[in-house]
Image: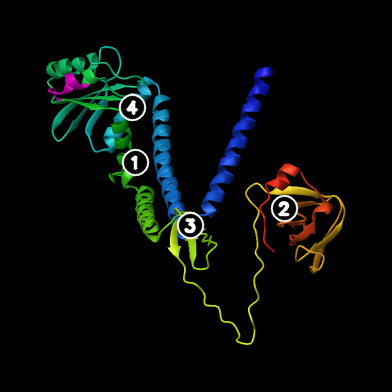
């Protein structure tokens, strides 16, 4: 019971990880340019076709090999004999049984006598069977010998048959001859020459070319943000999310003023520091444009509100602040509750 619950828990974690990975890949894919999107889709389709071609060929071969392994030794010998007949061999005879001296089938081809031994094995064939066939060749005065198996051969087998008139048909070669016989002489192309594999490789080549085009087209992502950061009207910093910040000169925009309008003296604006000084409104009152009772009322503050302090007047009676409504102005010192240390550190602001 505990093992089953633990397995369900692990399966749940794996499912969650797969979902998170797919969602992350989707967001990343949606941020790519169209060239990269086409490249990735083409590459995935080509890989899918290649995998399908390989899987289909492997499945067919595995199915044929399984059918051969389900035969009995005598049935396997008959199947090999029928294969030789389908391939055009003459005088094919099955000689299996006791006293066959390692020869299961005899056949003729192009005027030569062949001795065939069949081994329906799942493990590699040992070299002693090669030596038995070589001895049978001399006894029966045959020209060639073939050792057929559904599995493979050891390295020593190939060394034994290297300088002898003995052919070794492993499982792959046997299945290939079966394909040739079933297609009536038309050779079944290997997997890398079949149309799914050719289409897959073509699409893979196209995806690689598209990748090259996408690299030449520029950044992979679509979002490029440019922001001007400067206090000067003609200086700025261009910031690109895909590149490092570079300073450039931005042409100043000319200001055209009417001749009959006299420019007013701008009110100095003090921006809050990185660590703003805060105060609490003790008693509600007016926010004025100038640090005196004659200053124009531009807003009000209410008890309990928090304000950001920007500075103080030269006499210390008025404080410059920004309230919650982002209104910047002067309020009297008596309206706020402020730490004396913070107040002493406020800069003096000329009205």
Q: Is residue 101 visible?
A: no
Q: Quadrant of the C terminus?
A: bottom right
- First in sequence, mark 3 or 2: give its number: 3
Asked if the residue at tag 3 contacts the one at tag 4, i.e. Cβ–Cβ closer than 8 Å, the answer is no
User: Which residue in the structure is indicated by mark 2?
Assistant: 309
Badge 4 element: helix
Measure the C-alpha gap from mark 1 to mark 3: 65 Å
Residue linked to disc 1? 182
**From the viewer's perspective, is 269 left or right of 207?**
right
Q: Could you tell me residue 255's position as x and y percent?
A: 55, 78
Residue 39 lies in quadrant? bottom left
Q: Residues within 10 Å of mark 4 (few under 14, many from 20)?
A: many
Q: Which residue is mark 3?
A: 240
Report crowding for label 1: few under 14, some 14 to 19, many 20 or more residues within 10 A (C-alpha). Answer: some
Q: Nearer the viewer, mark 2 or mark 4?
A: 2
Residue lying at 28% horizontally and 25% vertically, measured from the top left: 148
- Give the mark toward the camera: 1 or 3: 3
Residue indicated by mark 4: 78
Residue at image location 52% in from the left, 51% down from the top: 29
Disc nearest the viewer among 4 and 3: 3
Q: CA distance from mark 2 to mark 4?
A: 102 Å
- Res 336 visible: yes
Q: Residue at x 18, y 31 (%)?
A: 108
- Viewed as shown, does residue 115 lie left or right of 226? left
Q: CA distance from mark 2 to mark 1?
A: 93 Å
């Amino acid at each position: 019971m505990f093992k089953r619950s633990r397995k369900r828990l692990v399966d749940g974690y794996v499912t969650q990880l797969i979902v998170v990975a797919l969602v992350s890949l989707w967001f990343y894919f949606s941020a790519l340019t169209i060239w990269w999107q086409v490249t990735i889709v083409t590459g995935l389709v080509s890989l899918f076709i290649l995998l399908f071609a390989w899987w289909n060929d492997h499945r067919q071969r595995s199915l044929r090999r399984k059918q051969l392994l389900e035969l009995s030794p005598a049935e396997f010998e008959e199947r090999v004999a029928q294969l030789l007949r389908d391939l055009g061999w003459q005088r094919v005879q099955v000689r299996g049984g006791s006293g066959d001296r390692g020869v299961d089938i005899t056949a003729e081809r192009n005027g030569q006598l062949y001795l065939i031994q069949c081994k329906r094995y799942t493990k590699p064939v040992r070299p002693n069977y090669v030596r038995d066939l070589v001895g049978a060749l001399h006894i029966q005065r045959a020209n060639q010998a073939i050792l057929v198996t559904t599995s493979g051969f050891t390295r020593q087998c190939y060394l034994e048959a290297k300088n002898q008139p003995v052919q070794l048909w492993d499982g792959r070669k046997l299945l290939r001859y079966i394909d040739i016989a079933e297609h009536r002489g038309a050779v079944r192309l290997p997997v890398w020459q079949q149309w799914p594999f050719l289409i897959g490789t073509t699409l893979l080549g196209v995806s690689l070319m598209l990748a090259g085009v996408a690299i030449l087209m520029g950044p992979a992502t679509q979002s490029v943000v440019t922001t001007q950061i400067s206090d000067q009207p003609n200086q700025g910093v261009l910031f690109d999310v895909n590149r490092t910040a570079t300073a450039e000169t931005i042409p100043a925009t000319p200001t055209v003023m009417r001749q009959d309008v006299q420019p007013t003296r701008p009110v100095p604006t003090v921006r809050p520091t990185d660590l703003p000084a805060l105060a609490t409104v003790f008693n509600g009152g007016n926010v004025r444009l100038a640090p005196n009772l004659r200053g124009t009322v531009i807003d009000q503050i209410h008890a309990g509100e928090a304000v950001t302090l920007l500075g103080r007047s030269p006499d210390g009676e008025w404080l410059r602040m920004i309230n919650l409504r982002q209104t910047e102005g002067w309020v009297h010192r008596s309206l706020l509750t402020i730490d004396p240390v913070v107040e002493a550190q406020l800069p003096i602001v000329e009205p």
